[in-house]
Amino acid sequence: MSLILDRTAAGGHRVSSEASTLPSGAGWGRALQASGGCHDDGSVGRGLPACFAGLMARGPRALLLALWALAALARPSSGSGEAGGGGWLRGGPAAAAVAEEERCTVERRADLTYAEFVQRYAFVKPVILQGLTDNSRFRALCSRERLLTSFGDNIVRLSTANTYSYRKVDLPFQEYVEQLLHPQDPASLGNDTLYFFGDNNFTEWASLFRHYSPPPFHLLGTTPAYSFGIAGAGSGVPFHWHGPGFSEVIYGRKRWFLYPPEKTPEFHPNKTTLAWLQDTYPALAPLERPLECTIRAGEVLYFPDRWWHATLNLDTSVFISTFLG
């Protein structure tokens, strides 16, 4: 499951987010058995070679389910995590499905001036910005432990995570992080999962946002609005569009797929980006493929007005967007 805090949704499509709900405990063993190739012993720790041999014989979707299950079993307990990872889970089914450096067709710029940004990118194409701001303080405040300490009791409102969101659920932020922030189930649909979408009072998060330094570039006639998110590994927004904006990764890695406004992608609004990557992407002709790249911690992606885009989190990702409405 993922969390999005958002204030605006410009354009003809809602600004969506990511989410997932998964089984736990012995359910992982049964999930692997259901995919074919594993025994119903309630464990994925025994007989793994034979288990994965059976899964590989049944195709990539079954193998991906196994990788997803193992990633969930390996997720850190409260307060743990890799050094520099903020206590958030690294890796998952999306990381196994994506060769992140095999294809990056979005320019990275570390020396971009405002004049060049306006001339070459602002109204033309996406660009990845590097080194424009220092958000090390904000990053420290976004660790799992610090966010739970500061905002664990806050009530957040979750909505369904398809292109259009309807159902609402209220629950404490700590419950979301500790019970619902798991790797994405590859078989789940958007309307079966939940996310938070701008229904809460933003003053509750002001103590965090005042430490964030947004990209220094702006567009005349627009007003910035922040959207803060925490998304489980393998989660992703299906294709949608809205106004221009910036999206910075604070922890984790986020894969982006983008099409210009005149080129509507082939997708189902209630299927996840992970399902699209498995089922649709491999059959695309080279000229039909999107612009794409993996955004890492400290990098900022700019997307112009009305560009179609979908996202896929390769790790549990913490990110913040600045929408220019």
Image (tube, rainbow, N blue to C red):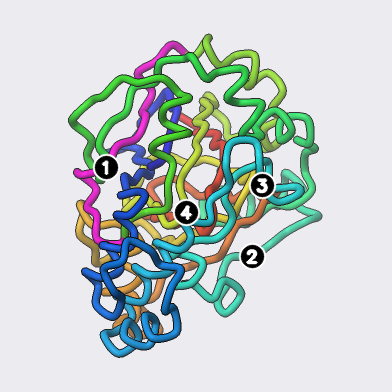
Q: Which residue is mark 4?
A: 233
Question: Can residue 45 be seen from the camera position used here?
Answer: yes
Q: Earlier in the sequence, mark 1 or mark 3?
A: 3
**Residues at badges 4 and 3 in contact (C-beta under 8 Å)?**
no
Instruction: Name the kind of residue labelled 3 in the image.
Output: Gly
Labelled disc at residue 21: none
Labelled disc at residue 193: 1
Instruction: Name the kind of residue labelled 2 in the image.
Output: Glu
Residue 195 colored in magenta in the image:
yes
Crowding at mark 1 (Cα within 10 Å: few <14, some 14-19, many 20+): many
Q: Position of residue 210 (x, y in %)?
A: 68, 18
Residue range corresponding to the magenta coloring: 186-201
Mark 3–mark 2 distance (CA, rounded to whole Å): 31 Å
**Marker count (numbered):** 4
Q: Earlier in the sequence, mark 2 or mark 1?
A: 2
Q: Which residue is mark 2?
A: 107
Q: Earlier in the sequence, mark 4 or mark 2?
A: 2
